[in-house]
Image (spheres, rainbow, N blue to C red):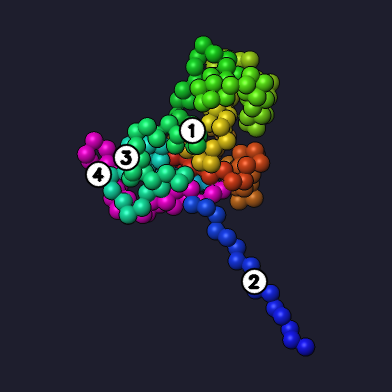
Amino acid sequence: SRRITQPKERTAMPDRVVDYQHATLAQAERVVLRNFDFVMHEGEFVYLLGKVGSGKSTLLQSLYAEIRVQEARRAQVLDFDMLALRRRDVPQLRRRLGIVFQDFKLLQELSAEENLDFVLRATGWHGRAERKQRIAEVLGLVGLPDSGYKKPHELSGGEQQRIAIARALLNRPRLLVAVFLFSSFFSIKTVSQPDFHELSTFRLQIPTLTVIIETWVLS
């Protein structure tokens, strides 16, 4: 009898969320990063480390089109061609990624829930019940299910950071860009190898979320 063997299945590589090849970035006509490659795959969790002035912020700003890619063999973010990106397409790109800024940029006169609702309404969520459900989901994901009524000044710095992260997750982004996060929620010093996967998904059951955090490590 003839023996038939099944071919081994090939493990598919995760999709490339960011793909820069031979890219050059500049600020105010000053070249900051020249001829570099940078790739992130779906589900990766990356710390971007370096000294002040080494180009970390410039790289992150290019991901959400705050600055343009000056030249590259290839420059794609979330399937957008960053070399051909038009100004009118920038809001569409930014709706598909989440951004957490160092100062959180919460509206001080609004409660946490109202801050989140403001973003949902601004990005086209019209149903009140749907918005309320999504707000409850993201507050639960960041561990603050009962803090939605509080205004920013009633929250600790770490809690404000979590609200900012919740806001960034509202529209279910594929890429999360976080700038200068220092609290224990992202503390490199507390990350052990067994806990890395848990941290990389924020304990949120979002295994496909790609995360890049800009920070530095003091020696």
Q: Could you say whether the residue bearing mark 4 is in a helix, strand or loop?
A: strand
Q: Nearer the viewer, mark 2 or mark 4?
A: 2
Left or right: where 38 falls relative to 30: right
Q: Could you say whether the residue bearing mark 2 is in a helix, strand or loop?
A: loop
> What crowding class fits label 2: few (fewer than 14 Cα within 10 Å), some (14-19), or many (20 or more)?
few
* Residue at numbered disc 1: 95
* Residue at numbered disc 4: 31
Q: Residue at x 27, y 41 (%)?
A: 26
Left or right: where 9 falls relative to 80: right
Q: What amino acid is labelled 3 in the image?
A: Arg
Is 25 colored magenta in this rendering?
Answer: yes
- Residue 8 disc label: 2
- In the displayed structure, would residue 22 be above or below residue 207? below
Q: Residue at x 65, y 24 (%)?
A: 130
Q: Could you say whether the residue bearing mark 1 is in a helix, strand or loop?
A: helix
> What crowding class fits label 3: few (fewer than 14 Cα within 10 Å), some (14-19), or many (20 or more)?
some
Give the mark, 2 or 4, whose residue is nearer the N terminus: 2
Q: Residue at x 65, y 73 (%)?
A: 7
Q: Main secondary structure of the magenta part?
A: strand
Callout 1 touching callout 4 (CB < 8 Å): no
Magenta span: 17-43
Tell me the CA gap for discs 1 and 2. Answer: 39 Å
Q: Residue furthest bottom?
A: 1
- Residue 68 disc label: 3
Callout 3 touching callout 1 (CB < 8 Å): no
Callout 1 touching callout 2 (CB < 8 Å): no
Quadrant of the rendered image containing residue 64:
top left
